[in-house]
Image (cartoon, rainbow, N blue to C red):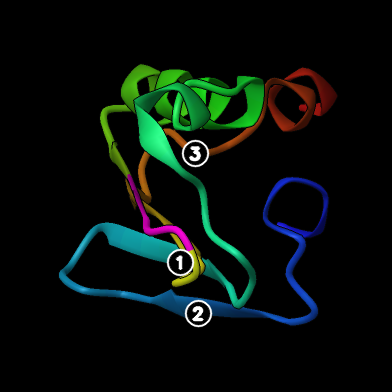
């Protein structure tokens, strides 16, 4: 948010849109990202891969001068990290 979008502030929202799901939205109030190439960065790609691996969805919306919003909608089941599973 700060590094790429040069945001001076960000908003984090966590909600439960339906039973068994959590939605995490991060909105950067910065310069936004321009073009498709900007939406292929490592952080964006990693978010897509993680969301897909747990059966969720990852959407990034951005416009030059309009900030950037990344939204992950994830199933609550299966979100336990491998570290928590190993500790059992």
Binning the other alpha carbons within 10 Å of mark 3 as few (below 14), some (14 to 19) or many (20 upward) gives: few
Is 75 placed left or right of 41 in the picture?
left
Q: Are marks 1 and 2 in contact (CB under 8 Å)?
A: yes
- Disc 2 marks which residue? 13
Q: Earlier in the sequence, mark 1 or mark 3?
A: 1
Binning the other alpha carbons within 10 Å of mark 1 as few (below 14), some (14 to 19) or many (20 upward) gives: some
Determine whether 81 is above or below 67 in the image.
above
Q: CA distance from mark 1 to mark 2?
A: 5 Å
Q: Nearer the viewer, mark 2 or mark 3?
A: 2
Is 15 placed left or right of 3 in the picture?
left
Determine whether 57 is above or below 88 in the image.
below
- Disc 1 marks which residue? 25
Residue 68 coordinates in the image, percent (x, y): 48, 61
Residue appearing at x 50%, y 79% in the figure: 13
Residue appearing at x 84%, y 26% in the figure: 87
Q: CA distance from mark 1 to mark 3?
A: 17 Å
Residue appearing at x 15%, y 70% in the figure: 18
Residue appearing at x 38%, y 59% in the figure: 63
Q: Nearer the viewer, residue 34 or 62?
A: 34
Q: CA distance from mark 2 to mark 3?
A: 18 Å
Quadrant location, the C terminus? top right
Q: Secondary structure at mark 2?
A: strand
Determine whether 44 is above or below 31 in the image.
above
Q: Nearer the viewer, mark 1 or mark 3?
A: 1
Quadrant location, the N terminus? bottom right
- Disc 3 marks which residue? 79
Q: How many marks?
A: 3
Residue 43: image quadrant is top right
First to last magenta residue range: 60-64
Q: Main secondary structure of the magenta part?
A: strand
Residue 34 coordinates in the image, percent (x, y): 45, 43
């Amino acid at each position: 948010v700060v590094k790429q979008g040069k945001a001076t502030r960000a908003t984090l929202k966590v909600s439960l849109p339906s039973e068994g799901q959590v939605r995490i939205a991060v909105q950067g109030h910065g310069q936004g990202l321009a073009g498709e190439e900007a939406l292929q960065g490592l952080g964006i790609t990693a978010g897509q891969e993680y969301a897909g691996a747990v059966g969720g969805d990852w959407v990034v919306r951005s416009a030059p001068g309009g900030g950037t919003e990344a939204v992950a909608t994830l199933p609550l089941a299966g979100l336990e990290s491998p570290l928590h599973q190993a500790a059992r």
